[in-house]
Image: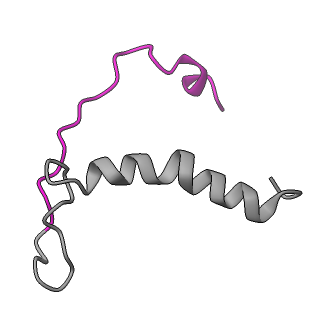
Amino acid sequence: MTLDWPQAVLVYYRDYFYPPMDRLTSPEGSFHAYDETTHPQLPDIWSTEAAPDGHFTQAENVT
């Protein structure tokens, strides 16, 4: 990436950044109505749950 810096950045935005942002900011997306000035309230927080026991065995063995 450092050798092709300008091209690599463009490829990153085209292939990795814009597709999820397009979905998040679409009318059905989580951040559609958020605007720091006109709609300062944040969207609802996504629900989370703990990972099952033993799911991260490699991380548990770190000392």
What secondary structure prevails in the magenta region?
loop
Q: Is residue 22 left or right of residue 61?
A: left
Q: Who's the residue at 54% across and 24% down the image?
A: 60
Q: Name the image quarter holding residue 13.
A: bottom right
**Residue drawn at point x = 29 percent, y = 28 percent:** 50
Foreground residue among 36 and 55: 36
In magenta segment, residue 60: yes
Q: Is residue 40 above or below residue 4?
A: below
Name above or below for residue 28 compared with residue 9.
above
Residue found at the very far top of the displayed protein: 54
Instruction: Identify the image quadrant of the C terminus.
Output: top right
Determine whether, in the image, residue 61 is placed left or right of residue 51.
Answer: right
How is the rendered protein coloured? Answer: one colour
**Residue 61 falls left or right of residue 45:** right
Q: Position of residue 25 (x, y in %)?
A: 25, 57
Q: Which residues are magenta?
A: 42-63
Instruction: Choose top left, top right, bottom left or bottom right for residue 31.
Output: bottom left
Write down the quadrant of residue 32 in the picture.
bottom left
Q: Residue at x 17, y 39 (%)?
A: 47
Q: How many marks?
A: 0
Q: Nearer the viewer, residue 10 or 63?
A: 10
Magenta span contains residue 25: no
Residue 53: x %, y % from top left: 37, 15
Decide which of 51, 14 is in the foreground and name it.
14
Give percent across and percent down for residue 41. Answer: 10, 71
Residue lying farthest bottom?
37
Residue 21 position in % (x across, y down): 36, 54
Residue at 53% over, 46% down: 16
